[in-house]
Amino acid sequence: MNRLINAKVTKSLSHLLIVTMVLSIFGAVITAPVSAQGASVQQTYTVAVVDFVNESRVQGELLARMATDAVVLEMSKMNRYDVSFTRNQIKAEMDKLDLRPPLNREGLVRLGDSLSADALIQGSLVKIGFTGQGANRTANVTLAVQMVDRASGEIINGALQNGQSSARVGFTADDDTLLTEAINSAAYLAVKQIADYVI
């Protein structure tokens, strides 16, 4: 009797294991294409970021380059944008096309065609200022960013953001450090605004 019960239990367990294995195999086959389809829903845009300009009259083009690099860095953290064009690549194409920043719509389209980019970004440091003294001194930066569609030349996205450095208790930072922090803050907020606004 015990042998009969043990045989039935063993047989049931064997059937259960076989069914479980078959279901797990079919489950993997069925869900794999669905997952692949879900991953391809979000389109990646190839974006060329043209060096920004400094309209603030504070310092010079070095700050504009810093803002450009900060925006590229923030965009590179997102799966939506491919910003792998280097500054040298973009500059070489602009020189070849005899283009100088800031570019108008026609210039952006020509550059985009030459680079085979989906979109282009250009921007400017609109305003830079300082407030407070000593450890309470902070830098404030206003950054404008525009994303232009290569095919139409139309602005498809953009941002205008203010970045501010943090006051430091018991430590007085130099103006360059404060500016770097404010620019990084403005770039982060600008890219976040662009990413949140999807047409």
Image: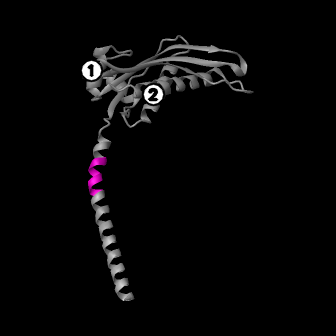
| Residue drawn at the location 37% of the way across and 88% of the way down | 3
Residue farthest to the right, as pictured: 170
Residue 187, x across and y down, in percent: 49, 25
Residue farthest to the front, as pictured: 1
Image quadrant assignment for residue 28? bottom left
Q: Nearer the observer, disc 2 or disc 1?
A: 2
Image quadrant assignment for residue 116? top left
Task: Give the labeled residue for mark 1.
Answer: 110
- Range of the magenta residues? 28-35
- Mark 2 to mark 1 CA distance (whole Å): 27 Å
Residue 179, x across and y down, in percent: 58, 21
Q: Secondary structure at mark 2?
A: helix
Instruction: Count numbered badges in the picture.
Output: 2
Q: Earlier in the sequence, mark 2 or mark 1?
A: 1
Residue 176, x across and y down, in percent: 61, 22
Pick the quarter of the image with the N terminus: bottom left
| Residue drawn at the location 63% of the way across and 24% of the way down | 166
In magenta stretch: residue 103:
no
Pick the quarter of the image with the C terminus: top left
Q: Is residue 28 left or right of residue 50?
A: left
Q: Amino acid at mark 1?
A: Arg
Q: Which mark is residue 192?
A: 2
Residue 6, x across and y down, in percent: 37, 83
Crowding around mark 1 (Cα neighbors within 10 Å: few <14, some 14 to 19, many 20+) is some
Q: Amino acid at mark 2?
A: Lys
Q: Secondary structure at mark 1?
A: helix
